Image (spheres, rainbow, N blue to C red):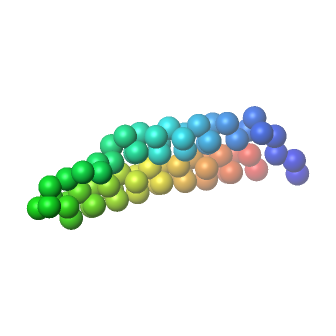
Amino acid sequence: MSVELGNWLLPLAVTIIAFGLASICVRSKSPDYLRVLNRLFNALILGLATIASLSVWLAWAIVVR
């Protein structure tokens, strides 16, 4: 079974867009009293990007087969 590179463009583009948007939303500087909340927010944003990316890759794998 050969897989063409063109078939990978959609999931790869979604992955790049999801993590690009997540990196924009991630906050690097925060006051000391909000540091834990900031870490939770960043983890939530990156988790959502990961879930979106994995969902698209899973759907792509199912459709290709």
Q: Give the residue at x 40% y 57%.
A: 47
Nearer to me, 38 or 11: 38
* Residue farthest along the bottom direction in this orientation: 36
Nearer to me, 49 or 24: 24
Q: Quadrant of residue 3?
A: top right
Position of residue 50 measured from the top left corner of the image (x, y, whole percent) = 48, 54
Position of residue 30 measured from the top left corner of the image (x, y, whole percent) = 19, 53
Q: Is residue 37 left or right of residue 52?
A: left
Q: Is residue 62 left or right of residue 20?
A: right
Q: Give the residue at x 14% y 61%.
A: 32
Q: Is residue 34 left or right of residue 45?
A: left
Circle count: 0
Position of residue 23 measured from the top left corner of the image (x, y, whole percent) = 40, 45
Q: Give the residue at x 46% y 40%.
A: 20
Position of residue 60 measured from the top left corner of the image (x, y, whole percent) = 65, 46
When the figure is inspected, residue 21 is found, relative to residue 44, above or below; the finding is above
* Residue farthest along the left direction in this orientation: 33
Nearer to me, 52 or 18: 18
Q: Is residue 3 left or right of residue 42?
A: right
Nearer to me, 31 or 36: 31
Q: Give the residue at x 61% y 50%.
A: 57
